[in-house]
Amino acid sequence: MITRSRRIQKPSSPQVTFPDIEIMPASAPTEGILLLEDGSLYRGLAESKGTAFGEVVFNTSMTGYQEILTDPSYRRQIVVMTQPHIGNYGTDPSVDESRRPWVEGFIARRFTDRVSHHDNSKGLLEYLNDHRIPSLAAIDTRALVRRLRQQGAMRGVVSSEVDDLENLRARLADVPPMQGQALVTEVTGRQETTLSPLPASPGAAAMQRCADGVHIALYDFGAKASIATCLRQRGARVTVLPADTPARRLQELGVHGVMLSNGPGDPEPLTSVIETVRQLLHGELPIFGICLGHQLLGLALGGRTYKLKFGHHGGNQPVQELATGKVSITSQNHGFAVDPDSLPSGCRVTHKNLNDGTVEGLALDGRDVYSVQYHPEAAPGPHDAYELFDRFLIRAEAQLDPGTS
């Protein structure tokens, strides 16, 4: 137990000493390191042991670390949290975004084992150890994030095996960069699954409810569970499809709309998926793309994507809708973006990021086809963009009854 004292002087009262107590983990952590491809070395405490390689990125969310850990879009990435204290509300299986955590490693200024939440199942450190996710604490995350902003996202290794740094350097040199990696096959579901609408609840009572029978196909490129939940809360039946599902299967299912989900890696190598999206564009079904789905839509239309310097990862990204001027605070997690100059005529940019001006939304003239680079389902993050699900389901409902506007 480490204690320090500070003295607080109050007028007309005696001096009082308050101990400032630092809670130590149940088992003392060992030394750990983060080594970046540019040679930068950060030493700290390995709160959960092991070695992991990946692209090092930072996330600016204040809360939602469990949703981040279980987001398949973080496949092959090591996540640094800018919020200095992580773990105070523990973990709860009900907020998982997929069947397992996907981050390769997890870094914070400090993890806490004092949990304060009524729904806590287990502490974060126990969770990280159970899933064998190497973690690092007690480093200057502000300096690390500044380096990532200046130099860009880099390959790195987080490890509790600190005795042979030369071996770690050699192994790190063999790690492929994120550009060129097709990772969707590593995270997509293997079986088609149909999910029923969720019953109305007090938390969902204000949501737009679509007509009975609306059926949505959700392509799983690494889909977060919250996407299907947002559709089901609004009364839709959702069939989740593996990434390699051919376009003809949607006609067999008789769906009324298609969602293209988020996912990890570089979109350009996904040539078969891009061709499937291109075939869907020849039909009449409404199509709504989110994050990787947005990038795949841009590629299917003939556009290009490019790698961002350090990406957008966090629940506080300002996005402006160009037609109305409305600004929404959004949740984002992506390292690639659509090049607006590569888009064909008839494809409009609908949203832009107010931090760097990058494309945040597309729409195809004359068709119910549109996409956003951000996450309207949030998780974690603000709910400003929930209405996009309502807009999509209104269009899908019109497929159920062609007379509906």
Image: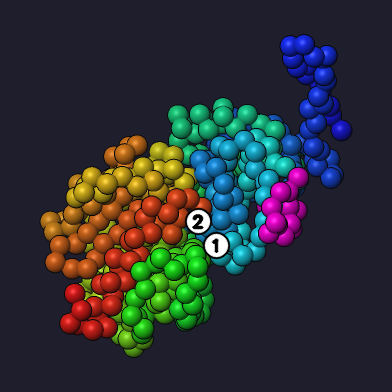
Q: Which sits in the foreground, 205 or 66? A: 205
Residue displayed at 82% across by 19% down: 16
Residue 382 versus residue 371 in the image, above or below: above
The magenta stretch is: 114-134
Query: Is residue 57 in view from this perspective?
Result: no
* Few, some or many residues within 10 Å of mark 1 (<14, 14–19, 20+): many
Quarter in which the C terminus is drawn:
bottom left
Image quadrant in which you'd find residue 274 = bottom left
Q: Secondary structure at mark 2?
A: loop
Q: Which sits in the foreground, 49 or 91? A: 91
Q: In the picture provided, is 171 more to the left or to the right than 187?
A: right
Q: Secondary structure at mark 1?
A: loop
Image quadrant in which you'd find residue 81 = top right
Residue displayed at 33% across by 61% down: 388
Q: In the picture provided, is 278 more to the left or to the right than 30?
A: left
Image quadrant in which you'd find residue 8 = top right
Query: Is residue 1 in view from this perspective?
Result: yes
Q: Which sits in the foreground, 395 or 287? A: 395
121 inside magenta stretch? yes
Q: Which sits in the foreground, 185 or 354? A: 354
Which residue lies most toward the top here?
12
- Residue 69 in the image, given as x and y percentages of width and height: 59, 54
Q: Which residue is mark 1?
A: 97
Q: In the picture provided, is 167 more to the left or to the right than 399?
A: right
Residue displayed at 33% across by 80% down: 211
Q: Which residue is mark 2?
A: 379
Q: Amino acid at mark 2?
A: Ala
- Residue 384 in the image, given as x and y percentages of width and height: 38, 52
Going from the N terminus, do you reach mark 2 or mark 1 first?
Answer: 1
Residue 325 versus residue 21 in the image, above or below: below
Quarter in which the N terminus is drawn:
top right
